[in-house]
Image (cartoon, grey):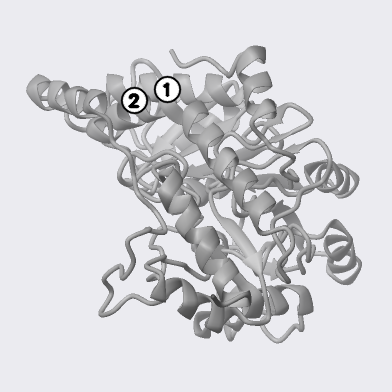
Amino acid sequence: MTEPETDSERDIDAETDGGVAESDTSETEPAENGAADGEAGGSVSIAAPDISSDAIDRVESVLESGMLADGPEVRAFEDEFAAYCGAERAVATSNGTTALHAALEALGLEDGEAVITSPFSFVASANAIRLAGGTPVFADIDPETYTLDPSAVERVLTERDDVVGIMPVHLYGLAADMNAIGDIADEHDLFVVEDACQAHGAEIDGDRVGTLGDAACFSFYPTKNMTTGEGGIITTDRDDVADRAAGYVNHGRDVGDDASYEHIELGHNHRMTSMAGAVGRAQLERLPEFNRERRENAAYYDEQLAELPIETPTAPEGYRHVYHQYTIRTDDREAIAATLDEHGVDTAVYYDTPIHRQPAYETVSTAAETLPNAERAAETVLSLPVHPSLSECDRRTVVDAVQDHFHPQ
């Protein structure tokens, strides 16, 4: 079983911060800037999944066993991931979107009920609300953290009486303001589903995301801090939510020990495969290492880019950022991206169109809202490579390229 990081591991991580300011939902990532015909154009990639020989061996063992679908390997992964987060239960799914959908179904979201969420996220977060029959209601983001602004949530609640839940998105590896959001939820008797698809291992005051709401959902898409190829998981301390989610992802079947083909509720096939579970178990063991390396890379960028006229990531005191993305902010985005491309560095924009401006959301009730912080972020953010596979030379190449844009040699 993969245990949470020890105090010594956290101390090592803190020592390598270098003064860094701690500040999926993407299931299909956008193409990198500077890429031609969908192919990565640079030698320093925006993402590089690291699959160990141990993970490959585990998959081979599963294949040899013949137990390829949902089974003991997935159950073990669920237990280990729940323990890592500090949650009581976990339910594995086929991807992060299905995790969000199943969590909402398990919480009893009914047709037409409203859930407040962020407009600045991958579209899957809002899609899951609609797929579960609900109505996404967008509240603006904090311009410093890019996460849901609790004061904006409060304003929405003064205008609507149909809201039953909040889905904060932990974006780029940074947790949303869960203390304030939790207080709001308690005051208004709302459920909270954490969209933690980009934040494996992120913390607030030592508490990991995945334990800060009624349920939380993670994605294991290849670009995430850990991967299963495709996959997702729900964590929760509520047995009723875990049982209903486990049933929903398995065609609504009874999850009891003696269950057979008794389908007690409407469900879907959102199960994780045993091969994915095997990869996930191996990746989870390496997640603390992956996150330390991401944070070290981010600290290096913070130091090297500090004097340039760009905004680098920030976080509130007590927050542990795990840098799914290292996202800068600049009014000169296209030109900087072009310069980096010339130096062989891939970049990406997450996300250039807020959800409330997407064509699929033209008929949603808050689609016409003006959400200036989200709209401004969409015009100015640019993500640089920060993944654990970066070499010292790669990091230097990224920094040299950004510096060269402002101070050409």
The quadrant the N terminus occupies is top left
Q: Amino acid at mark 1?
A: Glu
- Relative to 316, 330 lies left or right: left
Residue at the extreme front: 409
- Residue at the disc numbered 1: 285
Q: Assign a secondary structure to mark 2.
A: helix
For the residues marked 1 and 2, what is the alpha-carbon distance in whole angstroms?
Answer: 5 Å
- Residue at the disc numbered 2: 282
Q: Could you tell me if residue 191 is visible in this image?
A: yes
Q: Residue at x 47, y 68 (%)?
A: 348
Q: Assign a secondary structure to mark 1.
A: helix
Q: Residue at x 33, y 47 (%)?
A: 230
Q: Can you give x and y, in whole percent of width and height, for residue 233 in the image? A: 46, 38
- Relative to 315, 249 lies left or right: left
Q: Is residue 75 above or below residue 50?
A: above
Q: Amino acid at mark 2?
A: Ala
The quadrant the C terminus occupies is bottom right
Q: Is residue 272 above or below residue 230?
A: above
